[in-house]
Image (cartoon, grey):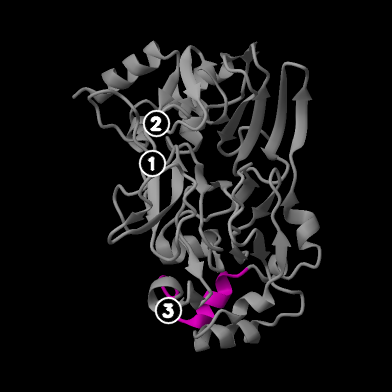
Amino acid sequence: MDIEKILSKELDNNNGILRFKPNYVARPLYPAGGRLGLDKIYVEGRGWISERWLASAVSILGTDYNGLSELAIKDSKIFFRDALKILPERLLGKSYAKRYGNRFGVLTKILDPGIQIPLHLHAGEEYAKKYWNSNPKEEAYYYLDHSDRGSTPYIHLGFHSDVTEDEILELLKRWSDDKILDLSPAYRCNVGEGFHVLAGVVHAPCTLLTLEVQEESDVATILQAKVYNRIISKEQYLLNGPKSEEEVLKLIDWNTCRDVKFYRKYHTIPENIESSKEFTEKWIFSPRNTRKFSGIELRVAPNTKLKMSRKGAFLLFVWRGRGKINGVEIVGGDPYRDELFVSYDAAEEHIVINEGKEDLIIYEIFGPNVYI
């Protein structure tokens, strides 16, 4: 199979657009919320399907292929990760591909937890490399408009300003309960808003359906011993990289976690870019917050045709409505027609059409330093 020829033909036929097959990920620690449109949400031996990974070129830590996104090309099995290696310049642009080693550089997820995700953190660059030989994992959340808010629509972030390292160390060594949540402030999660979570910041995400964007990484250290009415394995979830509780403490960004102005600094609301009767653009992941990634919400009114331009290749995820991009059909709520990759050349100039009777709502996710 000549993969390069197949990819080139697909891009030619679709005017620079690639479509993905839906990519669902199961997690063993907590039940799913059941909002991903699946009939079956539990997989024996793997857990509950509580996440959908979008445009993923990374696999779940410790696996070869679990988590990788596959392109929707008839009679072909091609992973997005491999496509980027085969046609990096066409997909990403020459300078971007060279700078980031033929990688997209960002992973996007739809989180669908049935209960609050246990308190955990993602290591910064030094420790992610040291313990897992992986990227760090800075991330951000945007809460999607869904009628089911779940059981726990609030998030724990950081620690109270007077919490000491010895208090946390004692709880980690004891490893018998979920009392660590008492030491972490909780904030209400609101649809249409979000939070920016730096690497090293402890967090227990809420049960709202969440659009998450992050660096390409799956490293995590769980600090909460009791999850879903059971004590989880300390070796598997706390000491899965570090060899002691004292080493775990070094993963924590204490200054950020105990910042008394944490909410003001890291709570996010959309920032208007441009608006008219025909369309509205807003930053939902602002490039002012980080150079690691950025994201736009585009709302297109019914019976509207737009000529758009972006600075780099991007993931396109359709949340509501139906239409076309460069002639390729897009339908919100249909997992086989709502996720696409817009290549570098197509991103520079493309046509978006709303063919439905409601607003077409699109989320566009960009990699590092596209918008700075």
Direction left: furthest residue = 1
Residue that badge 2 annotates: 20
Name the spot of residue 249 as percent of width and height, x first.
Answer: 57, 76
Q: Name the residue under label 1.
A: 23
Q: Of circles 1 and 3, which is in front?
A: 1
Above or below 224: residue 98 = above
Q: Do the residues labelled 1 and 2 touch (CB within 8 Å)?
A: yes
Residue 170: within the magenta? no
Task: Please name the amino acid that badge 3 sits on.
Answer: Lys
Q: Which of marks 3 and 2 is nearer the N terminus?
A: 2
SS class, disc 2: loop
Q: What stretch is highlighted in magenta?
A: 239-252
Residue 201, visible in the rendered structure: yes
Q: Residue at x 53, y 58 (%)?
A: 125
Q: Residue 234 carries which label?
A: 3
Query: Pointer 1: residues within 10 angstroms few (<14), some, or many (20+)?
Result: some
Q: How far apart are marks 3 and 2 (CA)?
A: 37 Å
Is residue 246 on the magenta stretch? Answer: yes
Does residue 265 appear to the left or right of 132 in the view shown? Answer: right
Where is the C terminus found, in terms of image quarters?
Answer: top right
